C-alpha cells in the first residue's frame, strides 16, 4: 500500500463529505423506497464503516506503540489504550 499522503487525506475528507451528504439527503424526507438501500453498505458487518474505523483505530494504536520509545509517558499510554478500547464494538459509539 502506498504511503499516506495529502492525496490520502483528501480521499478521507471526500469520504466524510459523502457520508455527510447522505445524512443530509435522509433528513430531507426523500421517498422511502429509494433510501432504504443507502445505509446497507456502510453498516455491513464485514466491511462497513464500523469495521473500517475499528481497523483504523487499532492500527493507530499499534503505530503509536511501535514508534514510541519504551519510556512513553502515562499520557501516551492512555492515548494508546483509548484507541484500543474505542476500536472494539463495546467501546465504539455507533
Image (tube, helix red, strand yellow):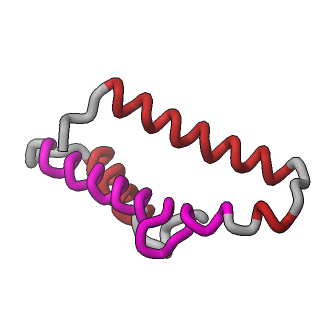
Residue 74 place in picture, x, y as percent: 28, 49
Q: Which corner quadrant of the image does residue 52 belong to?
A: bottom left
Q: Residue at x 60, y 65 (%)?
A: 94
Pick out the residue farthest to the top: 6
* Residue 54: in magenta span: yes
Q: Residue 24: percent from the left, percent from the top? A: 78, 44
Residue 93 in the magenta stretch? The answer is: no
- Numbered marks: total: 0
Q: For the N terminus, which image quadrant?
A: top left
Viewed as shown, does residue 39 lie left or right of 46?
Answer: right
Location of residue 32 in the rendering, given as x and y in whole percent from the top left corner: 85, 65
Provide residue 51's location: percent of width, then percent of height.
43, 66
Say which quarter of the image contains residue 33. bottom right
Range covered by the magenta-colored residues = 38-67
* Residue at the extreme left of the image, as rendered: 70
Where is residue 12, by image quadrant?
A: top left
Q: Is 2 left, or right, of 17 in this rendering?
A: left
Q: Nearer the viewer, residue 69 or 49?
A: 49
88 lies above or below 8: below
Q: Nearer the viewer, residue 20 or 70?
A: 20
The answer to whether residue 30 is above or below residue 39 is above
Direction from residue 28 to residue 76 in the image, left or right: left
Q: Is residue 10 above or below residue 41?
A: above
The residue sitting at 29% across, 49% down in the picture is 60
Q: Is the magenta stretch mostly helix, strand or loop?
A: helix
Amino acid at each position: 500500500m502506498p504511503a499516506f499522503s495529502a492525496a490520502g487525506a483528501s480521499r478521507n475528507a471526500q469520504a466524510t463529505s459523502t457520508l455527510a451528504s447522505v445524512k443530509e439527503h435522509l433528513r430531507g424526507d426523500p421517498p422511502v423506497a429509494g433510501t432504504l438501500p443507502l445505509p446497507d453498505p456502510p453498516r455491513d458487518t464485514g466491511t462497513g464503516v464500523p469495521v473500517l474505523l475499528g481497523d483504523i483505530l487499532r492500527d493507530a494504536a499499534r503505530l503509536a506503540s511501535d514508534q514510541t520509545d519504551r519510556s512513553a509517558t502515562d499520557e501516551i499510554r492512555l492515548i494508546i489504550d483509548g484507541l484500543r478500547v474505542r476500536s472494539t464494538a463495546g467501546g465504539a459509539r455507533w
